[in-house]
Image (cartoon, rainbow, N blue to C red):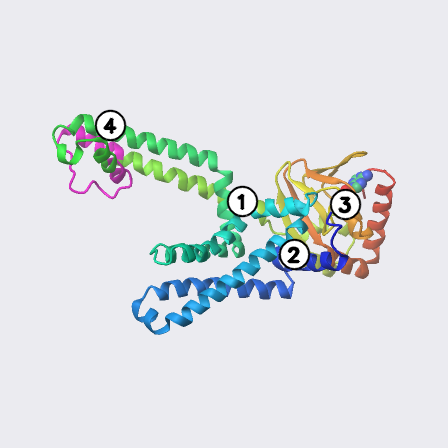
Amino acid sequence: MDISKPERSATARQRMFEILEHGRRRDFASRIIDGFLVVLVVTNVAVVVAQSVPEVAAEYGTSLYVFDRLCVIVFAIEYAARIWVAPEHPMLRGNSPLMARLRFAGTPLMIIDALALVPWLLELLFPQSTLVPLTRLVRLLKLARYSPAIATIGRVIVSERRALMACVIILSGVLLTAAALMLAIEGHKQPGRLGDMSKTMWWAAAMLAKIGGGETEPVTALGRIVSAITVMLGIFCFALPVAIIGRGFYEEIRRRDFVITFAMVARVPLFSKLDASAIADLVSILRARTVTPGTTLMRQGDRGDAMYFIASGSVEVSSPTLSAQLSEGDFFGEMALLSKEPRTATVTAETSADLLVLEVDDFLRLLDRLPAFKEHIEQVAIERQHGRLKDS
Ligand code: CMP
């Protein structure tokens, strides 16, 4: 814990973390800052394009240059602020502030942020280089932070990496085999076009991608048969990764964005006695989250920011003195919200689980609005505190 800092600074850091990293749906400041940064990135990239047009550069060169410098200053402040708040990140708690910052600096989005600042350094070092404007376009990647879809693509590629790697190996095998066969069959007949492996590999790549072999027509019957088979294998080789990524997307989206339905909320025993309008209210404030087996949902000692209801699946609650299983209809994560103390145990998904997440602000509002909910949650928390397992 960062005890050397005064409490006021820790609170400011916490708030800054919420604004920059937490992405709370209703946080006005967070939305304003995100919007500002998105506009700045897009405008900056537009400026890079504009600067490459000689007439525009001649007329507005100085203003565009000043704008670019201002962007660099804002991006540098943003980078420094994100590094400063890193110790607040739930996944990095438990590390020393320095270690948390170093580890955070190594995350993909922070590497992109650092790369966005590199062109400015390059410009200082190599003012004449024609490659510098190209490197400035890397800033467009900063938008990845604001696009859940891009994050989804990244996750799909990571989760399907083995199948995709198999596709690359198959494609390379087919390419090399077709190239070697063509060299053996037609290399001596068309030495200018198919006389070595570099030429036949280019021919094989063109056939596989179905852009045709250009002028290079096979002149032997065997050569034509190899060409026809190569084209057909090309269809297979390119369809395979498309199908793998499509399936990965479907799985990922199903995993993340299942729809919270009225029936699902009503199935949680704690809510089953509520009237229809109260359940409809809950449907709108609960957030869906599906997790895979082994996902750590909270760690003992973390600060509490939400509680969870299990719509399906099971989780394991563990601490040095406790091991318990919770399943469909149970809830967890309420103790830290009630006591404002750190989490009392670590909770890990045992199976794939559909969870309904209730953020701390909504939790506190609900306690005020639904006395029966408050009473039940407090009762279960007291029982758990006294070591009696399971709830409701
Ligand atoms: P919280 O302390 O916020 O985070 C860990 C959670 O584990 C805790 O809330 C409870 O929801 C749950 N938990 C703690 N002790 C027990 C217990 N004895 N039986 C079941 N669940 C528990």
Above or below, 287 against 202 in this view is below
Q: Is residue 146 left or right of residue 382?
A: left
**Neighbourhood count class around disc 4 (C-alpha, 10 Å): few under 14, some 14–19, many 20 upward:** some
Residue at the spot of label 3: 343
- Real-space CA distance between mark 3 and mark 4, rounded to the nearest whole angstrom: 63 Å
The type of residue carrying mark 4 is: Ala
The type of residue carrying mark 2 is: Phe
Residue at the spot of label 2: 17
Quarter of the picture for ligand 1?
A: top right
The type of residue carrying mark 3 is: Arg
Compare marks 2 and 3 and give the one earlier in the sequence: 2
**Neighbourhood count class around disc 1 (C-alpha, 10 Å): few under 14, some 14–19, many 20 upward:** some
**Neighbourhood count class around disc 3 (C-alpha, 10 Å): few under 14, some 14–19, many 20 upward:** many
Residue at the spot of label 1: 252
Residue at the spot of label 4: 180
Q: What span is in magenta?
A: 204-230
Q: Is residue 255 magenta?
A: no
Q: Are marks 1 and 4 in contact (CB under 8 Å)?
A: no
The type of residue carrying mark 1 is: Glu
